[in-house]
């Protein structure tokens, strides 16, 4: 028998044994529970027993019933590259079980070796190991799920805290931004108010200045008028003596003069030889006015 070929074959058989042990362990752990598998769990050990008896019988017959040869042969098989990890450890366990079950009599081993007892014992050992492995894996899986759940809960808590913190920071930032905007608006409004106030004051000052300028212009105009009037008066005063106004004769009514002439004519005594001569009476002119002011003319009243 070629150890390398046997090693590969035994590795495949070991995988089948492991699967059968897993099925039986699962059936045994879930038996009686709702929804449990309807597969007959007794099929697994039965199938294992047949396969195990075939392998063990081949080992015994290949060693010629000699337990030392069987030990050496299995040691060579278990050392092949196809055997590693769990397969290698199970190979050594099987080799030890076969050697322990063989007697010193090579003939009896070749002719009457009972593999059922060995396979039953090996099945129990394999099943126990698988149950432990399954239990360990289950515990590890549960622990992993628990840890994952705790980590998820912790992460969720951290996320909530982070979200809350970010919301608070955002709220603070928005409040700060609103405050800054309000301050900026207040500053801008104050600036506009100051500008409007300055413009109003400038307008008021300009109006006041214009009023003062208008008042000064009026005063200057009044002073100019007064100066012009005084100048005109002075000029008139200087011109008046050089060209005194002509005296105005008092108006003499015509009728009284005629009547007076008639009276005079009547008063003159008539001479015999001379014709009477009428002498017109001329009213005397009013006295001349003074050089500065002309005296008002007086009316001459005539007595009838």
Image (cartoon, rainbow, N blue to C red):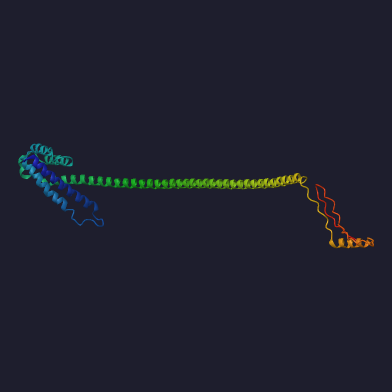
Give the x, y percent position of residue 256: 87, 62
Quarter of the figure with residue 220: top right
Q: Is 143 on the left or on the right of 189, as rendered?
A: left
Q: Is 252 on the left or on the right of 34, as rendered?
A: right
Q: Nearer the viewer, residue 111 or 230?
A: 230
Image height of 266 relative to 216, above or below:
below
Quadrant of the snapshot with the C terminus:
bottom right
Quarter of the figure with residue 162: top left
Q: Nearer the viewer, residue 203 or 279?
A: 279
Q: Nearer the viewer, residue 300 or 85?
A: 300
Tell me what residue is drawn at x 21 percent, y 46 percent: 130
Q: Nearer the viewer, residue 22 or 219?
A: 219
Q: From this viewpoint, is residue 120 visible?
A: no
Give the x, y percent position of residue 108: 6, 42
Give the x, y percent position of residue 143: 30, 45
Tell me what residue is drawn at x 14 percent, y 45 percent: 14
Give the x, y percent position of residue 64: 5, 40
């Amino acid at each position: 028998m070629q150890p390398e070929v046997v090693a590969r074959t035994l590795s495949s058989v070991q995988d089948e044994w492991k699967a059968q042990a897993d099925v039986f362990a699962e059936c045994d752990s879930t038996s009686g529970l709702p929804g449990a598998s309807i597969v007959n769990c007794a099929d697994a050990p039965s199938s294992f027993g047949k396969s195990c008896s075939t392998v063990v019988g081949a080992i015994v017959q290949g060693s010629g019933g000699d337990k030392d040869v069987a030990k050496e042969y299995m040691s060579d098989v278990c050392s092949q590259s196809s055997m590693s990890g769990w397969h290698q450890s199970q190979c050594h366990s099987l080799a030890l079980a076969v050697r322990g079950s063989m007697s010193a009599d090579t003939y009896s081993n070749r002719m009457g070796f009972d593999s059922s007892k060995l396979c039953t014992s090996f099945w129990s050992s394999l099943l126990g190991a698988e149950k432990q492995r399954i239990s360990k894996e289950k515990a590890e899986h549960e622990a992993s799920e628990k840890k994952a759940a705790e980590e998820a809960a912790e992460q969720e808590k951290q996320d909530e805290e982070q979200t809350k913190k970010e919301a608070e920071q955002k709220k603070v930032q928005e409040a700060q931004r609103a405050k800054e905007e309000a301050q900026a608006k207040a500053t801008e409004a104050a600036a506009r108010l100051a500008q409007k106030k300055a413009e109003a004051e400038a307008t008021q000052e300009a109006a006041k200045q214009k009023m003062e300028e208008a008042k000064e212009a009026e005063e200057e105009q009044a002073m100019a008028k007064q100066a012009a009037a005084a100048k005109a008066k002075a000029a008139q005063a200087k011109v008046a003596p050089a060209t005194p106004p002509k005296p105005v004769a008092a108006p003499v009514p015509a009728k009284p003069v005629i009547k007076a002439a008639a009276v005079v004519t009547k008063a003159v005594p008539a001479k015999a030889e001379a014709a009477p001569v009428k002498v017109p009476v001329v009213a005397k002119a009013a006295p001349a006015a003074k050089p500065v002011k002309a005296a008002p003319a007086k009316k001459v009243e005539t007595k009838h």
